[in-house]
Image (tube, rainbow, N blue to C red):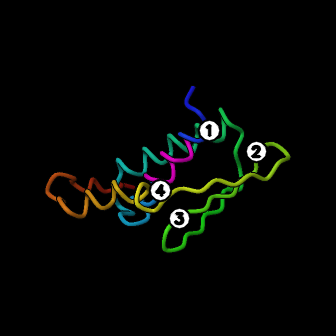
Amino acid sequence: MESLQDALYNWLTIKVVCDARPDDLAAKETQDFFEEMLTSQHHVSNIDISKDDVMYYVSYQQGEETKKARYPRELIEIMLNQINQEPEKYMDYPIVD
């Protein structure tokens, strides 16, 4: 089982990619995988994200408790930045309805 902190980090990283590339099927499937892990293994719900110039802030429910985490933007946006710098290496596989 992946730790909650790792699952939140991975989910947020791919969510940032999904938000920037809403038609990317691979990114969406990966986001769904981590969302399922957060809900089924870690019992997380009601995730809320905010950010400033330096950090992403994540608040969430885990059971009856509201918890918070924070991650440096530099780490969260690294995958999106890499995709944007070398788009030829990261084909956008669209979602087919």
Main SS of the magenta part reads helix
Give the mark nearest the N terminus, 2 or 4. Answer: 4
Give the mark nearest the N terminus, 2 or 1. Answer: 1
Question: Circle 4 sits in a helix, a strand or a loop, which is it?
Answer: helix
Question: Circle 2 sits in a helix, a strand or a loop, which is it?
Answer: strand
Find residue 52 and report its image quarter: bottom right
Residue under label 4: 15
Q: Residue at x 38, y 66 (%)?
A: 20
Image disc number at residue 55: 3
Question: Circle 1 sits in a helix, a strand or a loop, which is it?
Answer: helix
* Residue 26: x %, y % from top left: 35, 47
Front tag of 1 and 3: 3
* Residue 40: x %, y % from top left: 66, 35
Q: What residue type is labelled 1?
A: Leu
Q: What residue type is labelled 4?
A: Lys
Task: Mark 2 and mark 1 in contact? Answer it, CB < 8 Å.
Answer: yes
